[in-house]
Amino acid sequence: MAALTNELEDQTKGSQILVDFCKVQPVFIQLRERLLIPDVSLVVSQHTQSGNVKSERKKWGARIILAGDDAEAQRLQEALEVWEREMRIREKDADRELSKWLQRADEHHPKLLNLPRVQAYFSMGEYEMKCAEQGLLRKDDAIEKYAFVSQLSDRPGRPVTLRTDTEGAQVAIKSYHLTTRELHMHFLKTCSKLGALRGVMNVVPVVGVFIEDKWGLVLILYYENGDLAIWITNHPQRDPQLCPRMTHQIVCAVEGLHEQDIVHCDLKLENIFLTPTLKAILGDFDDVHDANSTMTSSVGLTCKHEAPEIRMGTVDKYDKSDIFEGLDMSGHASDASEMNISALIDRTTASDHTYRPLLREVMQSTIFKYVQASRQCAICYEAFIAAESLTCRNGHVVCDSCVDDWLKYDMTNTSHITRPIGWLPCPMQAHGCEKIWEPKVYAPHVTEKTFDEAMCLINKPKVSVARAAA
C-alpha cells in the first residue's frame, strides 16, 4: 500500500509539472522570439525584390510588343496575368513579413528603425513606416492593376472609382492629388490614423494604401447597399425597430473614434454605409483630426450637422463634439417619432454643449435597451453580434465562419503541430496581436469536423464529448 501511495504521489507531481509546462511554454516561446534581434536583411531584400519586379514587368511588356502574331501576343498576355496573380500573392506575404518585422523592431529594438538601410526603404519617413507596420502599405502598387468598373465620385482632386482587384473582389479606391511633399506627408499621416482604427466598432476598414506618381490612393471596402441617405429616400416607411439599432451603431462608431482620440469632422448621412444585413458603418475619413488639435478655416465640416460652437467659431480646438453631428443626423434617419428618441436628440443637439450627455450616457439610454452591440469581423468585415463571435483581449472580433477557415489554414502550418495543446493564434497576428486561444475557447465557434481534424494533427483523441462540455 505504501508503495502504491508513493507511486501515486510521483504520478501526481509529474502530471502537475506537465500542466505547468504547458501553461508557461507559450510565454517562453514569445519571450525567446522577442529577445532575438530581427534580421535587417529582410528590409534590404524587400527593397531589392521591389526593383527586380519592376524590371520583370518591363520585360513582359517588351515580349508582348515583339510577339510575332496576335495569337502569340494573346498567349503572352494570359501568361502575364497568371504571373501578376502569383506575384501579388508573394507581395502580400512579403508585406505581412515586413509588417511583423517592423512591429517587433518598434516594440523591442527601436534603434534598428534608424539604421540607414531601413530609412532608405521608407523615403517618405515615419508615417510611411507606420503604414507598413500596420500592414496597410502596398509599396510599388499601381492603379492599372485594378480593373475599372465605374466612377463613384468625380470630386476635383479626390475622385473615387469602383474597381476589381487581382482576386476578383470589388474595392473602392479614393485618389488624392498630392502636389507637394507636405501633402504626401499629410496623406501618409492620415492613413496611419486610419490604420489605428482597425477593430473599432462599425467603422469602414481600410484595405491598403499606396502612392503612384503624384497621387495617393486608399483602398476601402465597397458596400453595394449604398449610403444611409439613399436608403432613407428609398424607404419612407421605415422599420421602427431598425432605426434605434442604426442609431446605436453610429454612436458606437463615434465612441470608438473618440477612444482613439480622433474626431471624424464630417458626419453626415452620405458617410454612413450599409452592409448586406443593414448594419450602419461609418466611413469617409477625409478630414479626421486629433482631439484637441488646433482648428483651421480649411476644415471640410458638414455645415448641415455642425455643432453650434464650431459653426460660430467660439472654440479653437477640436473637441469631441461630433456626437452633436451624429445624433442630429440620426434624427433625420429615425424621424424622432418616439418620445424617448425625441428627448434624447433634443439633449444631444442642445446649443449649450455643457447640457449634452456623454457618449456613455447616450449608449445607456432606454431606447437602446434591447439593442445588441455588434462588431465587425476582422477578416470578412461583416458585422456580427459581439456576444456570438470570438473576441480576443485586444478587441479583434472573428465570426464563426472565419474562425473555422482560420483553423483550417493554421492546420497547414507546422507551427500548429508544435504549438502546445492545439492553441490557435488570433488571425490578426500579422498586425501585432499576440493573443492565443485555447481549444475549449474556440471549439464552440468551429465545426466538429474541423475541430476533430485539428486535434488529431497534434496526436489528441477526438474530443466531441469535451467539446460539448466546453
Image (spheres, helix red, strand yellow):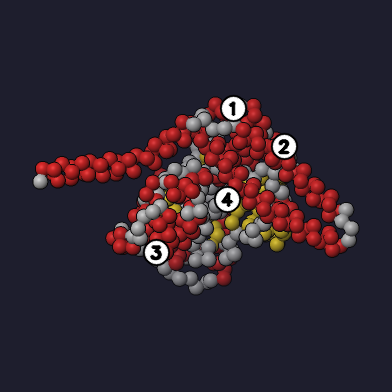
Classify mark 1: helix, strand or loop. helix
**Three-letter code, disc 1:** Asn
Tell which tag, 1 or 4, sits nearer the viewer: 1
Mark 3 vs mark 1: which is more N-terminal?
A: 1
Q: Residue at x 61, y 44 (%)?
A: 94
Q: Are circles 1 and 4 on residues that touch, CB within 8 Å?
A: no
Q: Are circles 3 and 1 on residues that touch, CB within 8 Å?
A: no
Q: What distance separates the C-alpha of mark 1 from that of mark 2?
A: 25 Å
Where is mark 4, residue-wise? 206
Query: Which residue is nearer to you in this view: 343 or 169?
Result: 169
Where is mark 2, residue-wise? 180
**Three-letter code, disc 2:** Thr
Mark 3 vs mark 2: which is more N-terminal?
A: 2
**Three-letter code, disc 3:** Glu
Q: What distance separates the C-alpha of mark 3 from that of mark 1?
A: 49 Å
Query: Which residue is nearer to you in this view: 163 or 468?
Result: 468
Classify mark 2: helix, strand or loop. loop
**Three-letter code, disc 4:** Val
Q: Are circles 3 and 4 on residues that touch, CB within 8 Å?
A: no
Where is mark 1, residue-wise? 114
Classify mark 3: helix, strand or loop. helix
Q: Residue at x 67, y 48 (%)?
A: 217
Q: What distance separates the C-alpha of mark 2 from that of mark 4?
A: 24 Å
Tell which tag, 3 or 1, sits nearer the viewer: 3
